[in-house]
């Protein structure tokens, strides 16, 4: 059975970068967390639209967002939004 690639929207990747910044992660640390090569993070930073990624990477990125999304909620609450 062939599993198709998945789209990651640009907004989700911006959220991932924001969370990584809040956690003080480097590109290398983020890459290790989501199971990718650091060059992938650098490449994704250059995209300004949705991107098609391997299913395992999409799953890892979604898991990272779900696990750490509370940090973004806390940040927006702290700013009075």
Image (cartoon, rainbow, N blue to C red):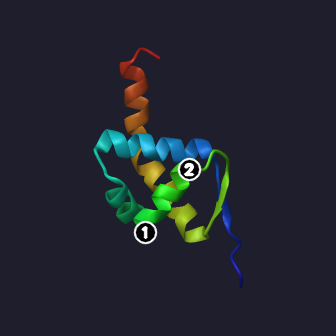
The image shows residue 40, relative to residue 23, as above or below, that is: below
In the figure, is residue 11 to the left or right of 72?
right
Side (left or right) of 27 relative to 42: left
Dot 2 falls on a residue whose secondary structure is loop
Residue 41 location, x and y as percent?
46, 58
The residue at the far left in this view is 24
Location of residue 19 (image quadrant): top left
- Secondary structure, mark 1, is loop
Quarter of the N terminus within the rendering: bottom right
What residue sits right under mark 1 in the picture? 37
Q: Nearer the viewer, residue 60 or 70?
A: 60
Looking at the image, residue 55 sits to the left or right of residue 69; the answer is right
Front label number (2 vs 1): 2
Residue at far top of view: 80
**What is the quadrant of residue 18 in the picture?**
top left
Neighbour tally class for label 1: few under 14, some 14-19, many 20 plus, Cα within 10 Å:
some
Which of the marked residues, 2 or 1, is nearer the chain's N terminus? 1
Residue ID for mark 2: 46
Q: Nearer the viewer, residue 38 or 58?
A: 38
> Label 2, label 1: how many angstroms apart (C-alpha)?
15 Å
Looking at the picture, does residue 44 appear above or below residue 38? above
Residue at image point 40% right, 62% down: 31
Q: Is residue 68 above or below residue 2?
A: above
Q: Position of residue 68 (x, y in %)?
A: 39, 46
Number of numbered callouts drawn = 2
Dot 2, how many residues are within 10 Å of its Cα: few (below 14), some (14-19), or many (20+)? few
Residue 74 image offset from top left, x and y in percent: 37, 29
Q: Is residue 73 left or right of residue 49?
A: left
């Amino acid at each position: 059975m062939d599993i198709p690639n998945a789209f990651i929207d640009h907004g989700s990747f911006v959220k991932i970068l924001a969370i990584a910044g809040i956690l003080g992660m480097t590109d290398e640390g983020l890459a290790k967390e989501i199971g990718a090569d650091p060059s992938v993070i650098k490449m994704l930073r250059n995209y300004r639209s949705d991107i098609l990624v391997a299913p395992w990477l999409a799953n890892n990125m979604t898991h990272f967002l779900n696990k750490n999304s509370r940090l973004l909620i806390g940040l927006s609450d702290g700013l009075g939004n």
